[in-house]
Amino acid sequence: MAHIHRSITIAALIDDVWAYLTESDKIAQWLMPNTFVAKPGHAFTMDCPPGIGSGAPVRCEVMELQPPEKGRARLAYTWVIDEPYTETLLEIELIEVARETRCDLVHSGWRDGKDALRDRHEEGWDVLLDTRLRSLLEGS
């Protein structure tokens, strides 16, 4: 499988970064409007705007939720697109190091080979993590 891997370090405490991954209103500020609830097994949607994506909702389900403890946290949820049908998994691990937080993202389950949808997501994660999320947390 052709996974997407991204890792950034954010000048913010792990609890602050965690809030932007698990609170619906904060997720909407950097990712998409959503119906996320921080509860394992919760099914939710992300409203993908036209022009950036298909304009259709992304259907998700929380698979793993490990809030910050001892400088580590983890979140995983399914990411299902209906057109073209694509079912993937988004995993985010946070590690706090010296009052900063490393955010490691793996978006897996893509087909091997050339895949325009995968390529769009890869480019999107660069902007979403490095520009939007970092800017919100670092105030830049």
Image: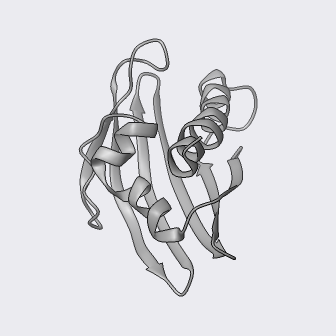
Find residue 62 and report its horizontal and vertical position in percent. Answer: 34, 59
Instruction: Please state the horizontal and vertical placement of residue 53, each as a whole percent of the image.
Output: 47, 20
* Percent coordinates x, y for residue 76 in the rendering: 46, 61
Image coordinates of residue 32 in percent, x first then y, are 38, 34
Q: In this view, does 73 lie above or below 127?
A: below
Query: Is 78 left or right of 130, judged from the image as shown?
Result: left
Q: Relative to 4, is 77 on the left or the right?
A: left
Name of the residue lying farthest toward the top: 51
Quick one: quadrant of the C terminus?
top right
Q: Which residue is drawn at 62% across and 33% down?
A: 127
How many numbered discs? 0
Residue depicted at 51% across the width and 51% down the height: 89
**Outermost residue to the right:** 113
The structure residue drawn at horizontal position 29% and vertical position 48%, both measured from the top left corner, is 24
The residue closer to the viewer here, 63 or 75, is: 75
Q: Is residue 51 left or right of residue 134?
A: left
Left or right of 62, for residue 103: right
**Residue 50, image quadrant:** top left
Residue sitting at x 70%, y 50%: 5
Question: Observer-nearest residue: 103 or 108?
Answer: 103
